[in-house]
Every structure is written in C-alpha cells, then in structure tokens.
C-alpha cells in the first residue's frame, strides 16, 4: 500500500512537471494584459530602470583597478551602456511587446550579463553572477517554461565557468568557492524555477475557476471580471455596447434523440462558432446548459450585422445534428441616457437581452429580437 502511494505521488509529480514544461504559453494574452492593466506602465518603468542600472554597473566597473581596461573591453562596455540606454527608452515609450520582443530582451539580458562578467574583476565576477537572478525574474513572469529552462542552463554554465576561473587565479580556496557557488546557484536557479512552477499552477487554478470545462469559454464569474474593458470602449464616440443572450432551440430534444454525448458536442460546436464570430469584438461566456452570453463593442454601423450574423454563422445544414438558436440583444449606444443615470447598466442590459431571447423562443425560435436602451 505504501509503495503504491509513493508511485502515484511520483507519477503525479512527474506529470505536473511535464505539463508545466510543455504547456503552450499565451504571449498575446500577456502583452494585452500588460497593455490594458494599470500596473503595466509601472512594470515597464521597473524594467526600464533595471536595464539602465545594468548599464550603470558596467560603467562603475571600469573604475576598478582589477577590471580589464583593454581598448576592446572599453569599447564593448560602451556598446553595452549605449544599448542599455536605448532599451530603457523603448520600455518607457513603447507598449509591452509580444513574443518576439520579450524573447529578444531575455536573450539580450543574458548575453549582456555574461559579457559583463568576463570583463569584471575576477574577485567580483562570482558575486556579479547574482545578476542572473534578476534576469531570471523576467523569464519567470514573461516567458514560457522552455525559455526559462534555456536561461537557467545558460546561467548555470556561466556560473560554473566563472567559479573555476576564480578558483584558478587564487581568489578563493576550494571550500569558499563551493560555498559561494552553492549560494549563487540557489538564488539564480532555485528561486526562478520554483517561482515559475508555482505561478503557473496558481494561474491555471485561477483561470480554470473562471472557465467552463466543456467549451473553454468563460463562465459567469469569468465574464463578470472581463467585461469592464468592453464597456469602456462602448462609451467612445460612434461606438456602442451590445449584450447578446443566445440559447439553442429545443435542446432537450437533441439530448433525448441523440444522447448527452452528442448534446455536449453541439454545445461545444456552437461555442466555437460563436467565439469565432464575436471574439474580436468582446467577450463570450457559457452561462447555462445551452445558454451563452456575449458582450461586444463595435461601431453603431456594424452592430446590426454582428448581431444578425451570429444567428446565421451558427446554423450549418451540413451538421450531423443541425440546430438553430434564439438571440436576444440589448444595445447601449455611446450617447444613451443610461450612461449618466445611477443604474447598473450591465445588469439591466443583461436582463433585457435575456428577456428578449425568451421572446424569440416563444415566437418559434431561430430568430433575433433586439432593443435599443
């Protein structure tokens, strides 16, 4: 019994590590989150300061009598300082980058740190390896596990080389060198890897609590947390917000005739098509068994086409189980008086859209009923 428990525990741990290392990393979501979240500007400021500080350290090291002062070393440090200034400025004036940008910065930080170590005084080189921990923090929060592992392999290799060089020139005895290397490795490798694994697990748990397991759409809790940006965009001149309540017609008959497995396939198929249709304009959630709720923002010239197009794109006669939907839509234009009233516009629009959806079902289904608020 004890052996079996330990085997299950080992398999579970290995599975967790494998899932962590192979998981797809959503760089687009990360970039959009940083651009839209109020903390995004602060994060870019911290990254800009850290980059500039790296350049300042390269300048300070030149004043050490033990540093390399050859013309090539001075030129290279000048290049590092100049690049640090440019990259710092880019963090301040540019939005948070996507995959290519964060990967390029990570590689730049690793190579710049390593080259600085080579030119630093031998006595300071091992201590300076702690800078890899700062770079590792960036990899932890903004890059995939595979890039983090690549960074750790590179950093550990540099640390070992520096430790050997430090010992060879007689700057420390063997015991002191091993002691220092152990501390540096714990900081550089242990903290980022553990943090990334923990952040990943916590993020997945947080995300899964807001997602519908069958369709991968938001659930009602996830929708409540995601619609603020959509409503803000709707207040812009010439735009509007619409709440769409979508329900599959006569879905009980589908389950009765084809079984619940086929019914689940229908729910997932409708979710995918509806997400493809409205995903670029807002957020979508599955709020009940066969019910969906979309909150979208677009121009007032496009909103009718978007709403009526949702019904058409969901119906395909070639489907094995062809179904229709009823849609209720409540539209709030940017100049609506509701914006200036002390009312919960989201709740009111949702209730009206839901009521209109039931009205569409009561008149035979496969239709759209909409109202302007």
Image (cartoon, rainbow, N blue to C red):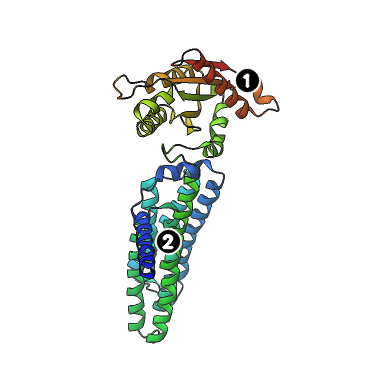
Residue 114: image location, x then y, percent: 36, 66
Q: Secondary structure at mark 1?
A: loop
Callouts 2 and 1 close, C-beta under 8 Å: no
Residue 107 visible, this orientation? no
The front one of 116 and 5 is 5
Residue 240: image location, x then y, percent: 54, 23
Q: Dividing the image into 4 quarters, which one contains the N terminus?
A: bottom left
- In this figure, what is the number of numbered marks? 2
Give the alpha-carbon distance from disc 2 to disc 1, as whole Å.
Answer: 49 Å
Indicate the quadrant where residue 319 lies: top left
Indicate the quadrant where residue 120 lies: bottom left
* Picture residue at 47% right of the left edge, 44% below the top: 94
* Picture residue at 40% right of the left edge, 20% below the top: 324
Can you say whether 242 is above or below 138 in the image? above
Q: Nearer the viewer, mark 2 or mark 1?
A: 1
Mark positioned earlier in the residue sequence (2 or 1): 2
The front one of 152 and 351 is 351
Read off the residue under disc 2: 136
- Mark 1 residue crowding within 10 angstroms, few (<14) / some (14–19) / many (20+): some
The front one of 41 and 342 is 342
Can you say whether 48 is above or below 194 in the image? above
Residue 257: image location, x then y, percent: 36, 25
Indicate the quadrant where residue 10 lies: bottom left
Residue 293 visible, this orientation? yes
Read off the residue under disc 1: 336
Q: Secondary structure at mark 2?
A: helix
- Mark 2 residue crowding within 10 angstroms, few (<14) / some (14–19) / many (20+): many
Q: Furthest residue to the right?
A: 342
Residue 135: image location, x then y, percent: 43, 61
Q: Dividing the image into 4 quarters, which one contains the C terminus?
A: top right
Q: Which mark is residue 287?
A: none
């Amino acid at each position: 019994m004890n052996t079996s428990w330990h085997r299950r525990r080992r398999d579970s741990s290995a599975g967790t590590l494998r899932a962590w290392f192979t998981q797809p990393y959503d760089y687009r979501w990360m970039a959009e989150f940083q651009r839209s979240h109020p903390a995004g500007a602060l994060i870019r400021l911290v990254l800009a300061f850290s980059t500039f500080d790296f350049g300042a350290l390269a300048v300070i090291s030149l004043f050490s009598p033990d540093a390399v002062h050859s013309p090539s070393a001075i030129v290279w440090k000048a290049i590092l300082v100049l690049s640090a200034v440019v990259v710092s400025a880019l963090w301040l004036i540019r939005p948070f980058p996507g995959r290519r940008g964060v990967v390029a910065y990570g590689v730049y930080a690793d190579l710049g740190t390593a080259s600085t170590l080579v030119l630093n005084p031998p006595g300071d080189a091992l201590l300076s390896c702690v800078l890899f921990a700062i770079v590792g923090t960036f990899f932890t929060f903004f890059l995939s596990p595979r890039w983090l592992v690549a960074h750790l392999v590179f950093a550990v290799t540099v640390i070992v080389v520096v430790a050997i060089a430090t010992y060879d020139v007689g700057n420390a005895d063997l015991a002191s060198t091993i002691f220092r290397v152990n501390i540096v490795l714990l900081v550089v490798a242990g903290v980022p890897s553990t943090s990334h694994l923990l952040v990943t697990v916590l993020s997945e748990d947080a995300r899964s609590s807001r997602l519908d397991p069958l369709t991968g759409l938001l659930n009602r809790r996830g929708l409540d947390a995601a619609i603020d940006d959509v409503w803000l965009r709707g207040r812009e001149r010439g735009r509007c917000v619409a709440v769409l309540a979508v329900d599959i017609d006569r879905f009980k008959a589908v389950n009765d005739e084809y079984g619940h497995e086929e019914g689940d396939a229908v729910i997932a198929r409708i979710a995918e098509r509806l997400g493809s249709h409205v995903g670029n304009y807002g957020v979508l959630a599955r709020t009940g068994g066969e019910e969906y709720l979309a909150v979208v923002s677009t121009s007032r010239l496009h909103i009718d086409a978007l709403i009526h197009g949702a019904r058409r794109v969901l119906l395909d006669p070639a489907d094995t189980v062809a179904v229709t939907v009823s849609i209720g839509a409540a539209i709030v234009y940017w100049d609506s008086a509701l914006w200036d009233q002390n009312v919960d516009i989201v709740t009111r629009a949702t209730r009206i859209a839901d009521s209109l959806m039931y009205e569409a079902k009561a008149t035979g289904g496969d239709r759209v009923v909409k109202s302007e608020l």
